[in-house]
Image (spheres, grey):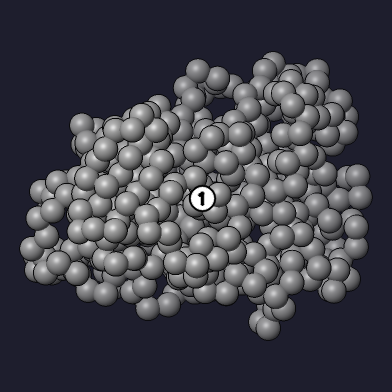
Amino acid sequence: MKRREFLKNGFLISIGGVLIPKTILSCRKETLFEESSFSGKVIIIGAGAAGLYAGYILKSKGIDFQILEASNKYGGRIGKNDSFADFPIDNGAQWLHGKNNILSDFILSSNTKITLDDTENMYWFKNNLVKELPKNPEIFDEDNLPDVSFQQYANQKEFGDDYKYIIENLAGDQGASASKLSAYWNHQEEINWVSGDDDYKFEQTYFDFIETQIAKPINNEIKLNTIVKSIDYSSEIITIIDSNNQKYTANKVIITVPISILKKNKIEFTPHLPNEKTEAFSKIGMGAGMKVFLKFSTQFYDDNIVGGSICAAYANEKIGKIGEDNVLLAFIMGEQAEYLTSLGNDDAITLKLLEELDLMYNNQATKSFISSYVNNFTNKPFIEGAYSYSTINIGNSREKAAESIDNKLFFAGEAMNLNGHHQTVFGAAETGYREVINILKNNK
C-alpha cells in the first residue's frame, strides 16, 4: 500500500517543527493571525478533515464559527469500526503518508502511536504469486510523460495483458481506474509532494486521532444532519438555507464538501458560480471506491497482494495493531469498485473476493473465512466516491476550483490541495488551514 515515490523536496518553511510547503503558507501563521482584525462569523460546510481543522484553527483564535454537516456524524471519509475485530479498524483513510505535513508533528506531540508499514508486495502475475516482476511497472515516474491514461501509456511501453491489473493497482492507489488517470498530470502533481515516502499505521485509528485532538474541542460548534441546499452570497451577509428551510447567516463561508458534490451541483449558489469555476470542478476526477474487510481463522495470505482482477490491492489489516484477529483489507478503486457495487449486496461482493483469494491461495480463503465488513463510499449520499484524481486535460483545474469568490466563498477539501497532497487527510487539513489564512489575511 505504498504511494509511488514521486517525491521531491521543493521549497519549504517550518511551522511548529513541521515543514510546510510555501504553496500553503506565505509566511508564519503567528504573524498572519496577529495582524488580522477579522471579527465576523464563519460558516463551514462539511465536517470532514478540512472543515474540522478549519474550525479548530478558528476556535484557537477566538473567531465565531459554525460547522454544518449533512450526515449524522463528523469525519467525512474518515471513520472507525471497533466491533468487527479485536482491534479497531479505519473505515476510511488509515495510512499516514510521510511525516512532513501539517498533522504529523501534531500526531507525534499527542503521543499517538503509529508504526512504520514496511511490508513487501507479492504480485499476482500469470496466475502465480511472485515477489518480483520481469519488468518494472513504475514507468509513470519518467520525464516527458504524455497526457494519456495510465492504461494507454502502459500499452505504449509494451506492457501486455499480464500487467493489466498491476497497472490498475498503481492507478487505484491514486483513486482512479487506469483508463481514466492521466499519466502526465498525475506525475506533475506528485512532483510537489513533500510529506515523505514512508507509510505509517495507527495503533488505534486515524479517526481516533482526528476525533480526540481536533473534533472534540470544537464539538459544540458542529451541527449534524444539516444538509445545505443553497448559499446566497449576493449581499454583504451570506445566507445559507438547509433542507429544513432553516436559515443561517455569515460573513464568510468555507465550503469543504467532496468534489463529487460540487460536480453534481447539489448546492445551489446565488449568483451562479462562474463558468470557469464549475468547469474546473468538472475536470477533477472522483471515482468509485470501497474497502472490504475479511476476517479469517488463519493468516494464509501475504501482507500485500497486488494485481488481482477483482481487487488489485489487498493488505494485512493487522499491521501496527494490537490484537489476534486475522483481517485482510481489500482496497478497491475505480472500475473494480464499480463492478463490485453493481453486484448489489455485500454478500455478493464478499463471494467474489473469496473466489479470487481461493484462486491465489489454493482454496484456503473459503475454508478460513469467518465474516466480512463492506464500506462502500460510492453509495454514501454525501460523499459518492473515494477521492479526487487527475484526469486527462485537468490542467490548472485544482487552482481554479480552489480560488475564493468575492472574498466571501472559500473552497477547501482534499481535491483543492495544490501541493500534491490531495487524496490525503493531512492534505485536506492543509486546505482548511489555508482558507482560514486567506480569510484572515484579507481582513487585516
Q: Residue 31: x percent and y percent?
A: 13, 69
Where residue 184 sits in the image (x, y, percent)? Answer: 66, 74
Q: Is residue 160 left or right of residue 403?
A: right
At 68% from the left and 36% from the top, the residue drawn is: 330
**Mark 1: which secondary structure?**
loop
- Residue 98, located in which quarter of the rendered image? bottom left
| Amino acid found under the numbered disc labelled 1 | Asn
Q: Which residue is mark 1?
A: 265
- What residue is shown at x 25% (from left), y 52% (from top)? 238
Q: Is residue 427 visible?
A: no
| Pick the front one: 421 or 303 | 421
> Is 176 placed above or below 34 here?
above
Where is residue 149 shown, x and y percent of the image? 74, 66
The vertical placement of 93 against 101, above or below, is: above
Horizontal and vertical percent position of residue 216: 25, 33
| Residue drawn at x 49%, y 25% as measured from the top left | 81
Question: Badge 1: how crowded within 10 Å, few (<14), some, or many (20+)?
Answer: few
Location of the C terminus by quadrant is bottom left
Q: Is residue 4 something that shows in the picture?
A: yes
Is 355 above or below relative to 54? above
